[in-house]
Every structure is written in C-alpha cells, then in structure tokens.
Image (cartoon, rainbow, N blue to C red):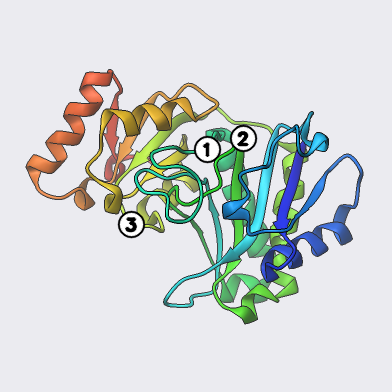
Amino acid sequence: MRFAIAYCKDNIAGKNIADRFRELAFSPQIPIIELKKETIYSEDINVKNYPELREVDFLFFASTHRSKKGDPSLCLHVSGNWRGADLGGKEGKVCLTSAFVLKYLFKKLNENAKKDKEVSEKYKVSMEATHHGPLLEIPSCFIELGSLENEWKDEKAAMVIARTILSLQDFKSGDWIPCIAIGGGHYCLNFNDIQLNSKYAISHVIPNYSFLVTETMIKEAEEKTSEQVRIALIDWKSCGKSEDRQKILDVLDKLGLKYERSGKVEK
C-alpha cells in the first residue's frame, strides 16, 4: 500500500514524527509533505495541489495531541465533523478512511509501544472519536503524540509512531468485519479493546457528545468507509436512557444496519 505523511512545519510533534520517519526510511516513494498551516485547516490537500499524492492510497496526518489532563498519549483517529465545524472541515461531513487499515495501525501502534519499555510505561495508546478537520477525498487518519510539550518533543515516542506508519507498507488485512461505532466518550475506552482483540474493524466513531444520532450521520459514516460496513457497535451504557437508545436502534433498523452491544463482543 502506498502512503504519504503530512505535517505542519510549526507543529512540534508533527515535525518530530516526520524527522524520525526520515531517519527510519527516507524514500522518494513515500511523500512527506510539509504544510504551512495546521493540519486541521489544510483543506487544500488534493492531487491538483500536491501531484505526489496521485498514486497514494492512504494519507497520515502527523500531529500533536492535546488534552486538559495532559496525559501522555499515542492516539489514532479519523477527521470529520458530526455536527459543527469549529476546528476545520465542514459541518456534518467526515473523511474517507479504511476500517481495515485503522485496525491494522492500532494493533501495530500498541505492539510498537510495548517494544520500548520507557514508552510503554509512560504512554497510553488510544483511539479517538472522529473529530475536527480537514475534509479531503484521500483515505486518511491522524496519528498523534501528546499531550504536552515534553511529550511532543519525545523522540522515542515519535519513533514508535514513525515505525507504525512505516508498517503500512506491509499491510495485510485479517478476516475482519468492517463496522462503525456509536457511543462512548472521546477516547473510545470500550472500543479500544474491540479494535485490538476482536474480529471487528472499526472505522468511524460517533461519540455520545455528538448525539442525537441521525440517519444522515450513519449514512455519512458508512459512505466514508472504504469497506462495506456490516454492523454498528453500540456502547450501550453510554447512550442515555432507554428511550434514547431506542431512537438509535430505530435509525439503524430503518437503514437496515445490524447492531451489537460492545459489551457482548467476544474478545
């Protein structure tokens, strides 16, 4: 699989990850694009403006992760907005991505972190719900190092991410079931274990703070997944009262999409 990396020249973690990747595998076959503005606002990433993306199958955005708690984190997520577009992209639109690639990368990110004792003891590896910009047509994801400046400058952690990016050149999918996920908080606590240890491959995650779930949101998640989505996983306990859960099920039933509670998934 051919892939490329994009990062903002002023983004500390993004540049750190890109520099570590150049040390690991500098190759003209892997475009590394330095952006002048922050990744979340880089709506001009397309083949017309960047011809080197013409044959690329997947694009990584290397960037900082920020959180109020400041927990050291290695994160993976898709960009897009379920509702408003305060941080780039467009309202109600999400990016194209691959459920199989995301599952593969999440497994590799966990594996690579565990190989470095210092990194594994310090950092938490997590998926995040689909959020922020930019909106583009190339299948993509964000891979992030956080959450404060000390972590953004951490070369060992950045190398873990660089190795995870490079691993995509050996990508092979398993006998996985492509799906979308509904519910839970921003850090996908219940879906992380599913992505890591089950037969399900998750693409987009609709967190509970983006509810009410609508037909448009489900269709957008399905259409922006490269594989044919076969099921929706629901973080049942986080979806409110019984009538709130029923509204979600009514939408899925109307669209003919099967569903399963995350707590019942075999891992």
Dot 2 falls on a residue whose secondary structure is loop
Q: CA distance from mark 2 to mark 3?
A: 24 Å
Dot 3 falls on a residue whose secondary structure is loop
Whether tag 2 and tag 1 are in contact, CB under 8 A, the answer is yes
Figure label count: 3
Q: CA distance from mark 1 to mark 3?
A: 20 Å
Report crowding for label 1: few under 14, some 14 to 19, many 20 or more residues within 10 A (C-alpha).
many
Q: Quadrant of the C terminus?
A: top left
The residue shown at (71%, 32%) is: 57
Q: Quadrant of the N terminus?
A: top right
Residue at the outermost bottom position: 150
Q: Please identify the quarter of the rendering in which residue 236 is found.
A: top left
Visible residue check, residue 267: no
Q: Please, is residue 133 above or below residue 48 in the view?
A: below
Where does label 1 land, which residue?
95
Compare marks 1 and 3 and give the one earlier in the sequence: 1
Q: CA distance from mark 2 to mark 1?
A: 7 Å
The residue shown at (88%, 52%) is: 25
The residue type indicated by label 3 comes to Gly
Residue 17, given in percent of the width and then of the height, sits at 74, 62
Is residue 150 left or right of 257 when viewed as pictured? Answer: right
Is residue 197 left or right of 30 when viewed as pictured? Answer: left
Dot label at residue 185: 3
Where does label 2 land, which residue?
139
The residue shown at (70%, 62%) is: 160
Q: Please, is residue 38 above or below residue 103 in the view?
A: below
Report crowding for label 3: few under 14, some 14 to 19, many 20 or more residues within 10 A (C-alpha).
some
The residue shown at (37%, 26%) is: 219
Q: 118 or 137: nearer the eye? A: 137
Dot 1 falls on a residue whose secondary structure is loop
